[in-house]
Amino acid sequence: MLDMAQPSIGDKVKIKAKKASYEGILMPRSELSDKEHIVLKLNSGYNIGISKKDISKIEKLPENMETKSPKTRVKVGKGLPKLSLVSTGGTITSKVDYKTGGVSPFKTGEELLAEMPKLAKIVQIDDIIQPFSLLSEDIGHKDWSKMAKEVYKELGKDKEGVIVTHGTDTLHYTSAALSFMIQDLNKPVAVVGAQRSADRGSFDGQMNMLCAAHYCLSDISEVAIVMHGESSDEYCIASRGTKVRKMHSSRRDAFRPINEEAIAKIWPDGNIVMSGTQHSERSSGKPKLLDKVEEKVALIYSYPGARSDILEHYIDKKYKGIIIAGTGFGHVATQPLDKKDSWLKSVEKAIDSGMFVGMTTQTLYGTTDSMIYSAGRLLKNAGVSYLKDMLPETAYVKLAWTLGNFKRSEVEEKMLENITGEFNGRIQPDSFLY
Amino acid sequence: MLDMAQPSIGDKVKIKAKKASYEGILMPRSELSDKEHIVLKLNSGYNIGISKKDISKIEKLPENMETKSPKTRVKVGKGLPKLSLVSTGGTITSKVDYKTGGVSPFKTGEELLAEMPKLAKIVQIDDIIQPFSLLSEDIGHKDWSKMAKEVYKELGKDKEGVIVTHGTDTLHYTSAALSFMIQDLNKPVAVVGAQRSADRGSFDGQMNMLCAAHYCLSDISEVAIVMHGESSDEYCIASRGTKVRKMHSSRRDAFRPINEEAIAKIWPDGNIVMSGTQHSERSSGKPKLLDKVEEKVALIYSYPGARSDILEHYIDKKYKGIIIAGTGFGHVATQPLDKKDSWLKSVEKAIDSGMFVGMTTQTLYGTTDSMIYSAGRLLKNAGVSYLKDMLPETAYVKLAWTLGNFKRSEVEEKMLENITGEFNGRIQPDSFLY
């Protein structure tokens, strides 16, 4: 039925189908596996597939949405407080390309600023650093080091703080990496992304950037993720870079602090309310860069029926460290599944091979404890380090960083040292599902 | 210093240390790796380690806490509604053994009932089925089948419903397994555990069992986890067995419904408030048992720097299925890390080998979507099944079950079919962090 109307890709069309009518931009289907559907980008920004069989009419509408994309160029504000911007890719710096389909990153930081006139009114951003442009699922260990180097350089300049823009998929891994790689931080570093793209009415990037800018003008000297605190546009929260996790695939308030409250609520008009959570303050000290990283580190989950030969795989590949996201207080099966499979033996073998094995909990909230059940005691006896309430993702990043920057003999001690707030000595009960 | 006072393991002692004084039961340290500390079980039930160096005085107290453990035997109530109890181990059926240290399961169901006189007042429990007694981290695929068989048998008897007691570590994996293995369920099945052991003031097992019993007297015919809804003792929630996850290592309200509201709130006095969440009703139909399970199934997480050779490991081991907990809308890196590593190629190789590869999201809340970003489209093109808002843990269980009970050619369709409420077609925004 599509051929009947012969609209082109990128045209705005109205489609009458069996159940409903739809208006939107006709998207290309080159990368789509299903040839029975056509794909329409609705005005809401979402793509839907419509079965060709169900379509009774396709009408080309006169207006082409492409003409809606902003053409304004915003002059960078002079005389305002200066911030650095490290731009790395992701939705916050992405737009929809109606000719090729899908979402692609902006090519220049200027294009980004053109989308955010409110930001240009409160801060001056001269330098736009682009170490790379990647969707965040493609970011690897070496990219953490690249970002840390750039942020470190900017911290030495005459700027109030640094904003890092980044895709949201792995934003919390990067915020943890920057937290560890830049020691004795002297200024605010805001790590920020967007859950909705700039072509959508629900775009959250502009407000997140505004809040991030206000964060960078504050006295809080921590690496923090600054994004929506609620689904509405009321305020953002700044969550410590090592105590935060993406907890929803699409909500604008997806980034939640875990095992502690957010450091601050930040309103887009610049109002900041502190939660009382401990944090470092802006200082005149000089930060230290520890940007090496060990790549032979893995994160594995424990679940019923999980076989311990996964550890043998990593021993064979000469891995230096493993973080286990165990069940409950930090458990794997300690009763062998069968004669060939014993987690206790595999853990011992891994540790004998020189590997560091750290335990976290897949419950995410709460802390590990090796002392409550026999499984914990047996695993601790076998040499597993219990990493308290550190998030599995943060522990993974910290282990790659610790193995990269310290002697092997110091690793266990470093992993248990509270370096940048990755442990919360006093978990507040009301911080659950905050 | 410990030798000075020479108290025995199991004695109640008062210890004066540098920072504070402590009273509790002296615990054995045989399984503890650290010989510099002695371990005390405080009256709160928690164990603490006290550095021997800090101890200035140990005083043996006259009272031995062992005498506090309940000796009452409760007669099983006659003439009350009948329930079945399938007891499998875990904290809810555990007590502390002061002579050997740690927590160990009760040996008989009668011992359990003796702890719960309130339960015996509202329901009659004649049969106490014990297919095995395991801590839940040791439960494997075959144990799911054993439990399903026993529950299925009980459903055919003249009982109102079935309570399954179980350790909490993997309780939600088991509730998902029972949800799939027993089709056309005709009665309520409550899966229940305890986060705190029976020797502690904060023991939650009795109230959870009471609520589970009330659930079993209701008309809700679903496998549900029935446990504390709040940290206080006010009410329990019944969460669908496929839409629930242990979200805290120690809180009594650790089990949270994900991507839908709990089916009901249940007060220990029997008051039940329904949330309006869709559910099946008690019926006179006959359930169907599909209890086979494929063991060669794995659950892996995606994270920055994760290498795709983990898939090669599972291809070599002739695995039949993999669930990936991807980032964001369901992503792994689609840009190769280096020449040796490409997730897209490894995924294609896995699928060519006959493996089913399913995608979920590690954000837990929200849904996967292959259409929004290029990574999703590329992975879907490579043959990955996007499993909507199904939890990674539920998807893992469902895959083991689907591969066990259906032809390989039916697996993809079955994985995408909403069999027992594992998909929520209409995710309510307010169900986030519910």
Image (cartoon, coloured by chain):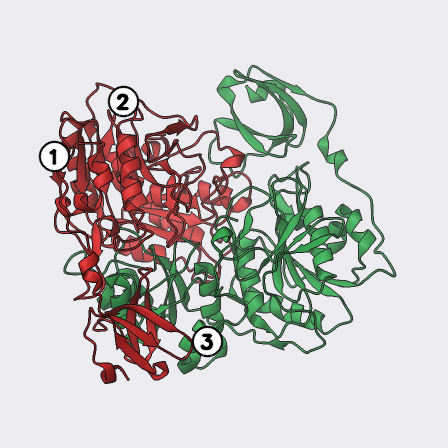
Chain colours: A red, B green
Residue drawn at x 48%, y 75% as measured from the top left: B404
- Residue B354 seen from this side: no
Q: Image quarter for residue A114?
A: top left
Point out residue B347 in the picture as x, y percentages from the top left corner.
27, 68
Q: Is residue B374 found left or right of B220 in the rendered image?
A: left
Tell whether label 2 touches label 3 (CB within 8 Å).
Answer: no
**SS class of the residue under badge 2?**
loop
Residue type at mark 3 is: Lys
Residue type at mark 2 is: Arg
Give the letter of the chain under mark 2.
Answer: A
Front in this rendered view, residue B200 or B175: B175
Q: Mark 2 points at which residue?
A: A282
Residue drawn at x 52%, y 39% as measured from the top left: B31
Name the image quarter holding the N terminus of chain B.
top right
Measure the C-alpha gap from mark 3 to mark 1.
Answer: 55 Å
Point out residue A214 in the picture as x, y percentages from the top left corner.
29, 31
Front in this rendered view, residue A61 or A240: A61
**SS class of the residue under badge 1?**
loop
Point out residue A31 in the picture as x, y percentages from the top left corner.
22, 71
Q: Is residue A24 found left or right of A133 in the rendered image?
A: right
Point out residue A398 in the picture as x, y percentages from the top left corner.
30, 39
Q: Mark 3 points at which residue?
A: B414
Q: Which of marks 3 and 2 is in front?
A: 2
Count residues near mark 3 (Cα–Cα under 10 Å), then give few for <14, some for 14-19, many for 20+. Answer: some
Residue type at mark 1 is: Asp
Count residues near mark 1 (Cα–Cα under 10 Å), then give few for <14, some for 14-19, many for 20+. Answer: few
- Residue B355 seen from this side: yes
Give the letter of the chain under mark 3.
Answer: B
Q: Mark 1 points at which residue?
A: A126
Measure the C-alpha gap from mark 3 to mark 2.
Answer: 56 Å
Q: Residue furthest front?
A: A62
